[in-house]
Image: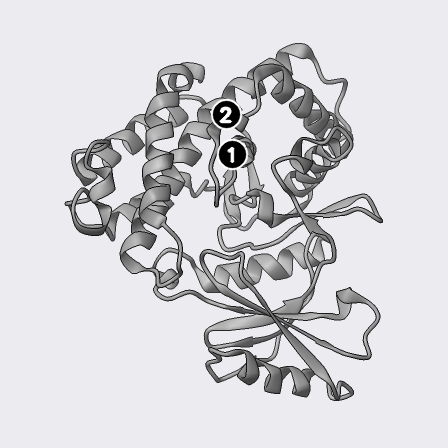
Amino acid sequence: MAVSHKDIDINDLEAGKELVASLRPTWSAIKCKVFDSGITNKLFGYIDESCTDKNEMILLRIYGKNTSCIIDRERELETHLKLNKSGFASPVYCTINNGYFYGFIEGNTLTADSVRDANVAPIIAKSVAKMHCSVPITSTEPIFYSTLCSWLSQLPEDLTSGKLVVLENIIKDKNTLLGELEALHSKIIGKSDLKIGFCHNDLLLENVIHNTTKQSISFIDYEYGNTNYLSFDLGNHFDEYAGVETVDFTRYPDEAYQKWWLKIYLEEVHKQKSLGPVTESTVDELYKEVNFFSLCAHLWWGIWAAFQTLNSEVDFDFAGYSRLKLEEYFKQKVKFFNYI
């Protein structure tokens, strides 16, 4: 699907408004909105006063400074288009040099309470399962190991001074993180039956939209979407029950809750693939994989946040977030490292 491109850079609300006017020539009274929840990109919204449906809003995503070093923006766009074609994402209207315009999805982002709601959680589980089963992949190589190798290669050897001094009591230097990555990778390649497929890879609460009217779930923000271990997507989602702005790892779901959720997920997978009933042993096996990969996700975002600390201009405590994720990685490693 071809998308028009404008050879310009846009960095402010009003400049975006001018391009929206060209995309929607019948709009004569365009209102603007700044969304302030993102920690990687800027996000603006535009809608005409005559519009009665919020889904008519056009969003402008402006890429964060230096994020092209850790995010393949061409692949992000391809992923968005692929998800739209599969029914999981809004349409893309136009690209610019430092971002793109796309459709709005009406609904509420998840909260620490709504993600656990007994009526909402099953919809999330089924929606993730459908995405895992339906979105095609162009590569069969999971990105977990190669992505972290790339991010680490761009970090300095010293990760415990300057802006990253908060890590001094957690790691010795970059080699500590490289060693942990190699240990995880060794466990992963030793288990040949891990399922792979398309993963969102960033299923935090604010990237999951619940439409209360339709009782549907949609996913947004596809920067990291790519082939990966399906259990990584699930383990990372459970990690994200802790939140981002205010992190509380005691919210990580217990075994009983996870197995309830994972059974719903597996039942939808089996339905999509016309497989037989889900057995207790299948749920138990997935539970172990998911908790192992929850470790992998902590390391992933700990390294990501260290990179952002040194490169991002977004007003967010990336160093503190890196510390929290790496502390939790080492804390939970004792329990979950040998789950696969």
Q: Which residue is mark 2?
A: 250
For label 1, the residue is: 242
Looking at the image, is 279 positioned above or below residue 300?
A: above
Q: Is residue 140 left or right of residue 159?
A: right
Other residues around mark 2 within 10 Å, as few (<14) / some (14–19) / many (≥20): few
**Helix or strand or loop: what does disc 1 sit on?**
helix
On-image quarter of the N terminus: bottom right
Can residue 39 be seen in this snapshot?
Answer: yes
Which of the labelled discs sits on residue 256, or is there none?
Answer: none
Measured as percent of width and height from the top left, residue 177 is found at 25, 35
Q: Is residue 281 above or below residue 293?
A: above
Asked which quadrant contains residue 82, the reply is bottom right
Which is nearer the N-term, disc 1 or disc 2?
Answer: 1
Q: x, y (%) of residue 307?
A: 30, 51
Going by the numbered disc 1, the residue's amino acid type is Ala
Q: Nearer the viewer, residue 179 or 302?
A: 302
The residue positioned 68% from the left and 56% from the top of the image is: 89
Q: Dividing the picture into quarters, in which one does residue 277 lie?
A: top right
| Identity of the residue drawn at 78% across and 87% down | 26
Instruction: Tell me if residue 258 comes above or below residue 230 in the rendering.
Output: above
Total numbered badges shown on the rendered structure? 2
Amino acid found under the numbered disc labelled 2:
Thr
Pointer 1 and pointer 2: residues touching (CB < 8 Å)? yes
Say which quadrant the C terminus sits in: top left
